[in-house]
Image (cartoon, rainbow, N blue to C red):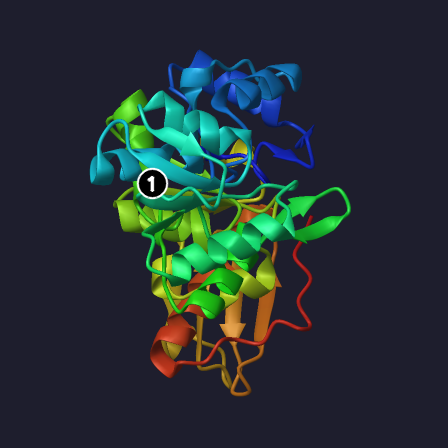
C-alpha cells in the first residue's frame, strides 16, 4: 500500500526510479495499491495520472480518503442520505459511488451530515456556512488531517489546516477517515485484498502512524516530508518497521540495529546502536555521533535505533544539528 505524494510523485512528477521499482515489484507477483489522503481527485483521475507517469494503474488500484470517508458515512447514515460536501470532485464522486446524495448548498435543511476534504477551489463564503452548520451540531467527517503536502514550490498547507480552523471555531471534532485513522487502510485491504499488507509512506505522522493503527508493517522512504529531525524524534507509534532512502529498499534485506550498552560503548557515551558498518553513539549532552561506513540506509537504521532507545529511556530526543546523512 503506497502513499502517493512524496512516495510515488512530488507535485505531479514521478519520483526518480519509482516507475521502474513498481514494475519490478509487480513482476515479482506483489499486488500494489495506491493509498492517498488527497480527497480532491477521483480514483480514475489518479489512475490516469499514474499511468501517464509510467506507473500503469486502474481505478480499482487506487483508494482515496474520500472513498474511506464515504464508507464511514454510508455505514452511519445508509444509502440515500443527503450529505453536505465541502471539497472537490473526488469527494462528490466517492459519495455517489456508495449511494449517498452529495449536496453542495450549505443552506440545505435536509442534510444529515457534512464531509470536508482538500479542495483548492473552495471559497470562503461556503466555508463560513459549513462552519456554522458544524457548530450547530451537524455530524462531521473529515477526509484527513494532513497539515501539509509536498509540492514543486515547497510544503503547502493541507486540509488539516482547514480542519483545525473549523475545530477551533465550532468546538467540535470530526470523525477522520484518512491516515493516521484506520478507515482508509481498512478500506484498502477490503477492496484489494492482501495477506501481508505493507504500508509505504514518507510521513511518520500519517503513513507510519496509520499503519501502526491498522496493525500492519510499515516502510518509511525518505523522498518526501519526514527527514532526520522527524525520524530521531519519533514517538513509538510513529516508528516504522523498516526505513530506506527510496523504494529500492523493497528489494533488499534490512539488517536490524543492535543496541550498544555498558562495555560495548566507548568511554563518555551513554547509549548507541550499530547497524552493519555504522555505529551511532549518544554523548552525555544528548549529541548523536555516527562513525563507520557502508550502505547509507544502514546509517539511518543505526541512527534510528540509537535515537529511539535514548528517547525511551530519558524522554529526550537526541541532538543531530551536526549530522549530515550520507548520500
Q: Nearer the viewer, residue 111 or 179?
A: 111
Query: Residue 113: where, in percent of width, then height?
Result: 33, 45
Query: Residue 208: where, in percent of width, then height?
Result: 41, 49
Looking at the image, residue 217 lies above or below residue 33: below
Q: Quadrant of the N terminus?
A: top left
Residue under numbered circle 1: 110
Q: Is residue 253 left or right of residue 229?
A: left
Query: Residue 60: where, in percent of width, then height?
Result: 40, 17
**Residue 224 shows up from this direction:** yes
Query: Residue at left 61%, top 71%?
Result: 320
Q: Is residue 258 left or right of residue 285?
A: left
Query: Residue at left 49%, top 39%?
Result: 105
Q: How many marks?
A: 1
Looking at the image, residue 5 lies above or below residue 131: above
Q: Nearer the viewer, residue 134 or 254?
A: 134
Query: Residue at left 23%, top 38%?
Result: 77
Among the 4 quarters of the image, the one containing residue 290 = bottom right
Among the 4 quarters of the image, the one containing residue 182 = top left
Q: Nearer the viewer, residue 161 or 212?
A: 161
Tag 1 secondary structure? loop
Q: Is residue 2 left or right of residue 297?
A: left
Query: Residue 241: where, in percent of width, then height?
Result: 37, 48
Amino acid at each position: 500500500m503506497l502513499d502517493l505524494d512524496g512516495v510515488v510523485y512530488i507535485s505531479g512528477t514521478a519520483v526518480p526510479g519509482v516507475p521502474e521499482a513498481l514494475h519490478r515489484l509487480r513482476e515479482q507477483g506483489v499486488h500494489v495499491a495506491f493509498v492517498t489522503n488527497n480527497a480532491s481527485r477521483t480514483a480514475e483521475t489518479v489512475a490516469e495520472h499514474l499511468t501517464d507517469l509510467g506507473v500503469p494503474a486502474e481505478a480499482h488500484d487506487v483508494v482515496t480518503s474520500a472513498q474511506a470517508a464515504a464508507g464511514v458515512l454510508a455505514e452511519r447514515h445508509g444509502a440515500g442520505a443527503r450529505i453536505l460536501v465541502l471539497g472537490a470532485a473526488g469527494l462528490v464522486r466517492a459519495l455517489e459511488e456508495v449511494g449517498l446524495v452529495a449536496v453542495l448548498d450549505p443552506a440545505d435543511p435536509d442534510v444529515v451530515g457534512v464531509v470536508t476534504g482538500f479542495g483548492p477551489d473552495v471559497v470562503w463564503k461556503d466555508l463560513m456556512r459549513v462552519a456554522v452548520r458544524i457548530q450547530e451540531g451537524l455530524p462531521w467527517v473529515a477526509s484527513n488531517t494532513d497539515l501539509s503536502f509536498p509540492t514543486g514550490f515547497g510544503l503547502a498547507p493541507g486540509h488539516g489546516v482547514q480542519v483545525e480552523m473549523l475545530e477551533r471555531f465550532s468546538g467540535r471534532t470530526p470523525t477522520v477517515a484518512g491516515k493516521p485513522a484506520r478507515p482508509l487502510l481498512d478500506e484498502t485491504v477490503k477492496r484489494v485484498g492482501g495477506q501481508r499488507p505493507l504500508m509505504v509512506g514518507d510521513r511518520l505522522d500519517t503513513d507510519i502512524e496509520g499503519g501502526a493503527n491498522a496493525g500492519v508493517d510499515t516502510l518509511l522512504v525518505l523522498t518526501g516530508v519526514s527527514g532526520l529531525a522527524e525520524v530521531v524524534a519519533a514517538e513509538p507509534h510513529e516508528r516504522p518497521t523498516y526505513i530506506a532512502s527510496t523504494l529500492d529498499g523493497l528489494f533488499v534485506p534490512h539488517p536490524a540495529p543492535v543496541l550498544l550498552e555498558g562495555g560495548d560503548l566507548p568511554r563518555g557515551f551513554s547509549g548507541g546502536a550499530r547497524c552493519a558498518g555504522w555505529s551511532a553513539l549518544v554523548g552525555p549532552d544528548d549529541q548523536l555521533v555516527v562513525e563507520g561506513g557502508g550502505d547509507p540506509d544502514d546509517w539511518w537504521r543505526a541512527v534510528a535505533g540509537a535515537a529511539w532507545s535514548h528517547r525511551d529511556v530519558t524522554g529526550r530526543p537526541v541532538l543531530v544539528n551536526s549530522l549530515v546523512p550520507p548520500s
